[in-house]
Amino acid sequence: MCPNCEDFARTVLLLGQLALYADMDGADLDFVEAVSPSLAVSLPEPPFGVFPDDDSDEGPAPWGDV
C-alpha cells in the first residue's frame, strides 16, 4: 500500500463519521463545527488513481484554472 493511502482512507472515514454524527438528533454541532475544518485540512494528498481524471504528466491545476 502506498505511504499516504492509509492516512487518506482514515481521514476520509473520520470525515464521513463526523457527517453522520452531525445528522444525529442531539449532536453537538459546536463540536462538529470546531473539528470538521481541522480534519478536512489534515486530509493528505489523495493517492494516485483515486479520482478517474488523474494524469501522471500533469501537476495540480493553478488556482485560477480550477
Image (tube, helix red, strand yellow):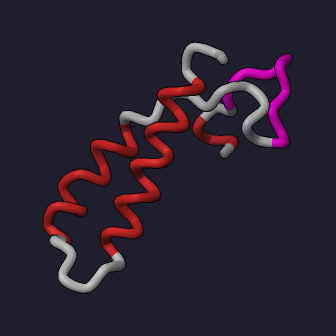
Query: Is residue 66 positioned above or below 27 on the image?
Result: above
The answer to whether residue 9 is left or right of residue 28 is right
Tell me the quarter of the picture where residue 22 sits: bottom left
The answer to whether residue 46 is left or right of residue 53 is left
Residue lying farthest top? 3
Residue lying farthest front? 1
Say whether residue 8 is magenta: no
Q: Where does the image place residue 47, in percent across and percent down from the top left?
A: 66, 26
Q: What kind of secondary structure does the magenta stretch mostly adopt?
A: loop
Residue at horizontal 37 percent and vertical 39 percent from the top: 41
User: The N terminus lies in which quarter of the figure?
Assistant: top right
Residue at horizontal 33 percent and vertical 43 percent from the top: 39
**Range of residues picked out in magenta:** 52-60
Q: Where does the image place residue 62, in percent across and percent down from the top left?
A: 64, 32
Tell me the quarter of the picture where residue 45 sits: top right
Say whether residue 55 is magenta: yes
Residue at horizontal 84 percent and vertical 40 percent from the top: 53
Residue lying farthest bottom? 25
Q: Where does the image place residue 46, in percent across and percent down from the top left?
A: 61, 31
Tell me the quarter of the picture where residue 11 sits: top left
Q: Where does the image place residue 35, in percent across and percent down from the top left?
A: 23, 51
